[in-house]
Amino acid sequence: MSSRNDSAWLLTASGSEMLPRLRENMRRFDDDDELDLVIVGCGAGGSTLLQRLARRGLRVAALDAGPFWNPETDWVSDEAGSHHLYWTEPRVIAGTDPVPLGSNNSGRGVGGSMVHYAGYTPRFHPSDFHTFTGDGVGADWPLDYQDLKPYYSDIENELPVAGEHWPWGDPHSYPQRPHPVSGNGELFQRGALTCGIPTKVGPVAIVNGRFGNRPHCIYRGFCLQGCKVNAKASPLITHIPDALDHGAEVRSDAMVTKVEIDGRTGLATGVHYIKNGRAHFQAARMVAIAGYSIETPRLLLNSVSPRFPDGLCNDFDLVGRYLMVQGAPQTAGRFASEVRMWKAPPPEVSTEAFYETDPHAAYKRGFSVQTVSPLPITWAEHVMAQGYWGASLRNYMSDYVHWACLGALCEFLPQAGNRVTLAQETDRNGLPIARFEYSQCDNDRQLVTAAQEVMERILTAAGAQEVITIQRFAHLVGGARMAADEEHGVVNADCRSFAVPNLLICDGSVLPTQGAANPALTIMALAARAADRLATAGTAA
């Protein structure tokens, strides 16, 4: 236990005082110091890469455009008071099915989107890595599930993850026992049992019992707004403290504007950034971008040079393409007894029984279903989406405690036309903002219809008197995908750019497909593997 605990968090630190103390005493580099690696973004991928390489003794710093959060002072148990956790900078959305940005699919500040994710951390299935070969859709990854399997296990132990033994995909267990099941979860289990659908509890990166300096979950229900008690794992309270303790720097409120390329060697030499209204340049021997699926393509496209007139690493017009979301419809059911669905981790009970391609269905690939628990403001959006307003809306809101809710994650397919480009509009720093164009294909729509039917069937079987469904999206991935060669991807299996040998991309933008699973665990596993591959290659020695 002690050796495992030593891998990614500090058991000797004194509770809520840990992060401020480490931040106050952290190593600070000068712009003129040539770092071994500078990382752009400090979310799931960037934080994991930072921590791994700091433990290897490298001179590393991560620059993040947002604040360095202190959960004790910066976060509140209030839905309306937590919108500052989202990236709400201007963007343009387009396409036949434009995707709203700025809430559940974005993050602002150190820790990234994992600061306000639901804590759900499933693995991808082995089939996710060869969907084109296996199902004739999507794309094959340049690596296999087995290449990530040991990293999945490592990260699950480091967060740690709680849940029942998982029978789907590659069957595996989790380091902590599952959390108690709430009313919402019990209704899901009841309805699924009646329908003959297997369910399991977990997996969530929420400690089940005191763990080092982190307390047991108190089931306050604000996972999606930031866990003030630090029971829910995010890089901010797991890998970042360990990175700081091993000599890394996290430079917050630092907006990177361009990656600099040496015109003679073609190598990256550092990054330009703006902090406190002043322009800076941080020199580095290597650069890693981890800004996620909108800001990573945007930064690459804004990093023009004589060598890359159409954007960095964009020789084959692949930067920004194949960006994906998951269809994420949510179906709620009203029950005669009180449910109080928020009194538990939001994704508590789930099923992956529909994850793989059904040979009898008209569509390819599949979806997962999990409990969700929209808080009152989000619940009001659900009700208003049904056309209710005024007195009817108030009646539904007063009934809030009687509702249970399920959410699906549908695997939408990668399409070249779903992409990020640069808009004509500029941001406060004079940089072109991102334009995100998205359109669904027929397969996507069929998946959503099938998922909605399953959720309505489960809730009805559990005794729901009324069901309502809202259509929504979740989890951006893609935009700088990995592939076997430069004509089909931006980076290779080690997250290293084909065009610039000392440039890495370590975030969700490298995913060629997205499965029907939340991506955080896979992003962290890919970053941990990339760090090992750097060391193995001797580049980071």
Image (cartoon, helix red, strand yellow):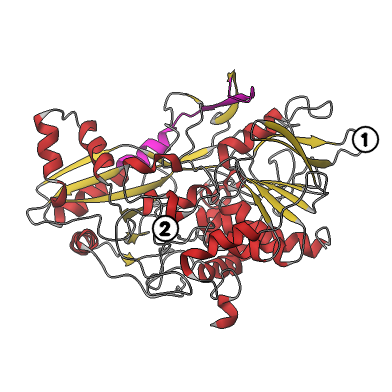
- In the depicted structure, whether residue 213 falls above or below residue 393: below
Q: Residues within 10 Å of mark 2 (few under 14, many from 20)?
A: many
- In the depicted structure, whether residue 39 falls above or below residue 526: above
Asked if the magenta segment contains residue 26, the reply would be: no
Q: Is residue 197 left or right of residue 130?
A: left
Q: Is residue 170 left or right of residue 50?
A: left
Describe the element under mark 2 as helix, strand or loop.
Answer: loop
Front-lying residue, 92 or 322:
92
Q: CA distance from mark 2 to mark 1?
A: 45 Å
Mark 2 or mark 1: name the one nearer the start of the chain. 2
Describe the element under mark 1 as helix, strand or loop.
Answer: loop
The reply to whether residue 313 is visible in this rendering is: no
Quadrant hosting residue 272: top right
| Residue 46 drawn at (x, y percent) | 63, 52
Asked if the magenta segment contains residue 428, the reply would be: yes
> Which residue is denoted by mark 1 in the rendering?
264
Front-lying residue, 396 or 61:
61
Quadrant hosting residue 390: top left
Q: Which residues are magenta?
A: 426-449
- Residue at the image position 61 percent from the left and 57 percent from the top: 24
> Which residue is denoted by mark 2 in the rendering?
119
| Residue 357 drawn at (x, y percent) | 43, 52
| Amino acid, disc 2 | Gly
